[in-house]
Image (tube, helix red, strand yellow):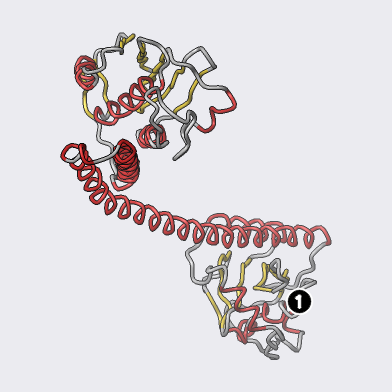
Amino acid sequence: MIIPDKPHNEGERLQALHSYAVMDTISEKEYDQLTAIASEICGCSMSLISLLDEDRQWFKSRVGLAATETPREYAFCGHAIQFATSPLIVEDARLDNRFHDNPLVTGDPNLVFYAGIPLVNEEGYALGTLCVLDQQPKQLTEGQLSALKALSDQVMALLELRRSKMSLEQSLRKLEEKNRDLEQFAFIAAHDLKSPLNGISTLTELLMDSHSEALREDGLRMMSAIKGSSAQLSGMISGLLEYYRLDATTEVPKELLPLEALKNQLMQMFAGEDQLAIDFETSIVQLNCNGSAVCQILVNLISNAVKYGDKDLTQVTIRIDELMSHYLFDVSDNGPGIPENQHHKLFQLFSIISPHDRKGQKGNGLGLATVKKLVYRMGGDVSLQSAPGKGLTIRFSVLK
């Protein structure tokens, strides 16, 4: 018996083999189907997907053989990977000096015939073989060899797919970890900034109330600007906290929500808005969803309609339809509308369509981003319809 030499690039070959993390994995149907087809096409009683590591050949899939691995020095495949560009065919191992006294020939499983196609990866390393074996001398036709080569290509395709999937999963894990770190930083930074900002706003207001006589007109204007900027920044921080708080909650529980209760909640929240009319158009009596989340979405949308409305009376119409698996909400207003080339920005974090609302204050671009996140968390989707001078309709769905 001649023990096969190891390839000159054995270190790199083993590194490539281990990059697939396939050694000692459980059997998989996709590989087993290929060895079954190889055995059938070639008329052989045995077929293997054999992979060679430092000191053994291990079988990812096998037909007609009980063993799961053998010592590498006995491996026919050890000779096959020496010639990665062509198959190794042994018609009668009993007459071949390399194998005639091999324990796999002289004893169980009494191998006689062997044909192996090297499994060569994209970097040119031979990882092992797809091989067929029998206990009788054989010859394969050109057609059988071509079919065996095609099947070996499929084995490599499965291995490459496995490695690509692992690489993608690793990249996703790293990306998720970075996102978690970034969100945690944003949450902590926003939380820590809120307290001193509130202090600035309170002290500014106290100074204006208590010492207004001692301040010149330009000083009062500056104090007022500080107070306004602090309030705007505090509002942005509150929005950030709310936006990232959604990621900390894993579940959005459902409940039976009477429509009248939802109406009453909204009317109470906007009771101070004399120039606002809210109408409901629906035949639904109650909803089966997360009432708090739906209410928060509607409050955001109605608040935006009020803030950016350009009419003496802001009219908001809420239509609710019940589909087989979802509730469908249309929230329409009579505002100035949004040009089509601005639609894609509307639900982006920190994206602001209008520089100022009707009171001259600048928005923070968090409200509709929060709406989108809430809708997605409830298994729905969100879109809009709008044109200049024709108002805005936000359509969103919620899983029942």
Q: As displayed, is residue 320 above or below residue 352?
A: above
Quadrant in the picture for residue 71: bottom right
Q: Position of residue 67 (x, y in %)?
A: 52, 74
> According to the image, label 1 marks what residue?
90
Tally of marks: 1
Say which amino acid is labelled 1.
Answer: Val
Q: As displayed, is residue 358 above or below residue 170?
A: above
Q: Is residue 242 visible?
A: no
Describe the element under mark 1 as helix, strand or loop. Answer: strand
Q: Name the image quarter holding the C terminus.
A: top left
Quadrant in the picture for residue 211: top left
Horizontal side of residue 391 vs 96, given as left or right: left
Q: Nearer the viewer, residue 366 or 75?
A: 366
Q: Residue at x 54, y 16 (%)?
A: 388
Q: Position of residue 384 (x, y in %)?
A: 48, 23
Quadrant in the picture for residue 312: top left
Q: Nearer the viewer, residue 206 or 65?
A: 206
